[in-house]
Amino acid sequence: MSSTKREQYLPFGRPNFSDEEIAAISRVLRSGWVGMGPETIAFEAELARFMNVRHVIAVNSCTSALFLSLRVAGIGPGDEVICPSLTWCSTANVALYLRAKPVFCDIDADTLCATPDTILKRVTPRTRAVIVVHFGGFAMDVAALRRALPPNVVVIEDAAHALGAMYPDGSPVGGSGNPCCFSFYANKNLSTGEGGAIALNDSASAETLQSLRQHALPLDAWKRFSHPETMLLSNQLTELGYKMNYIDLQACIGRVQLRRQVEFAGVRQKIAKRYVDRLGKLAPKIRFQQNCADAKHALHLFIVLLPLERMKISREDLILGLRARNIGATIHYQPLHTMPLYVGSAESEHLPVTEDVARRCVTLPISASMTMQDADDVIDSFSALHR
């Protein structure tokens, strides 16, 4: 067992770019059109086929995707939006942007996701939407949730971690029919540096989203450029929109990344299996997220839950020790209901599972750029520090 320091820092997530992505960028730069145009349109269509969904609307971030999904659903002041507390701040903030009230729910100790039961406990007559989070890449059962909820409550999926994951019935995340929001941030399974998308089946909502992402203009720049006759048509604003569009310089990278998803998923699954097999023997009391080495899991994050009561080292010292060895371990996340921002602007109660998971969880590096030697470095350093 080695406890020596790695020469290079290993981040918890790192994109995998090849010469093919570089060639795509060069092609688009040489075309002279880098804004939203034909590459974005093609990327949206390819994502829709990948997810088996009717429409995909690309935007500038998953935060924008979540916000626009609530906006199209008519969420506004006084409405309540239920979401888990163990998530990135965007999930709750998009409700605040619309002057709605986030309401935090608890999670399941094995899946680290909310459940129909934990969500239903927080439903009130003011509940207008639920944002579920497919945490780490585990796809929760949204069909079961839809059956359990009142019909007037909208379900929106935060799938920032979950591109490539599958629901319990084996269908791809994104194809449920609910508005499903994805992230293409730098460390995601499909990375274009920044960006996001909304997958949905409703054609009227898709048309509204296409307009809202571009100031609610009836005609975007590509339509005006590619069809000169449209310059003669009225392009007057009738409602307030936003500047949240995607661009072709990103989309061309995304199209290549999408074609490589099978390759990427295979690497992630091998890394996860190595972690489960070796760490399960070296530190048998630690716990893993459910299905964490399963093909249905997107494996954006690899979470371990520490048996703190049996350890002689604190979680913080473990993480600092790993980082001292150039292993980029981190924490996902500090629960939102414990943060000052949400006191008074959100409703919460004691969330025992969330709070217990939050004090035990550690995220170990996993990405399609890692090698098995990288994984062994993580395991050896973890084992040397873990007591």
Image: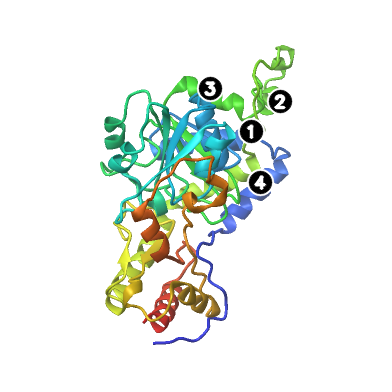
Q: Do the residues labelled 4 and 1 touch (CB within 8 Å)?
A: no
Observer-side mark, 4 or 3, equals: 3
Q: Which SS class for mark 1?
A: loop
Residue 360 appears in view: yes
Front position in the image: 232 or 63: 63
Task: State the image quarter where residue 145 is shown.
Answer: top left
Is residue 43 at all visible to an observer of this figure?
A: no
The disc, 4 or 2, on the residue closer to the chain's N-terminal end is 4
The mark that comes first in sequence, 3 or 2, is 3
What residue is shown with label 1? 37
Residue type, label 2: Phe
Residue where numbered disc 3 is placed = 207
Lower position in the chain sequence, tag 4 or tag 3: 4
Q: Residue 225 carries which label?
A: 2
The three-letter code of the residue at mark 3 reads Glu
Q: Of discs 4 and 1, which sits in the foreground?
A: 1
Indicate the position of residue 118 as horizontal and vertical percent values: 32, 43
Q: At which x and y percent is residue 249?
A: 65, 44
Label 3, residues with CA under 10 Å away: few <14, some 14-19, many ≥20? few
Inter-mark Cα distance, 4 to 2: 19 Å
Task: Label 2: state its secondary structure.
Answer: helix
Q: Name the residue under label 4.
A: 27
Name the kind of residue labelled 1 in the image.
Gly
159 in relation to 128, above or below: below
> Mark 3 and mark 4 in contact (Cβ < 8 Å)?
no
Q: How is the image coloured?
A: rainbow
**Counting other residues with Cα less than 10 Å from the Cα at mark 1, is it few (<14), some (14-19), or many (20 or more)?**
many
Q: Distance between the residues labelled 4 and 1?
A: 14 Å
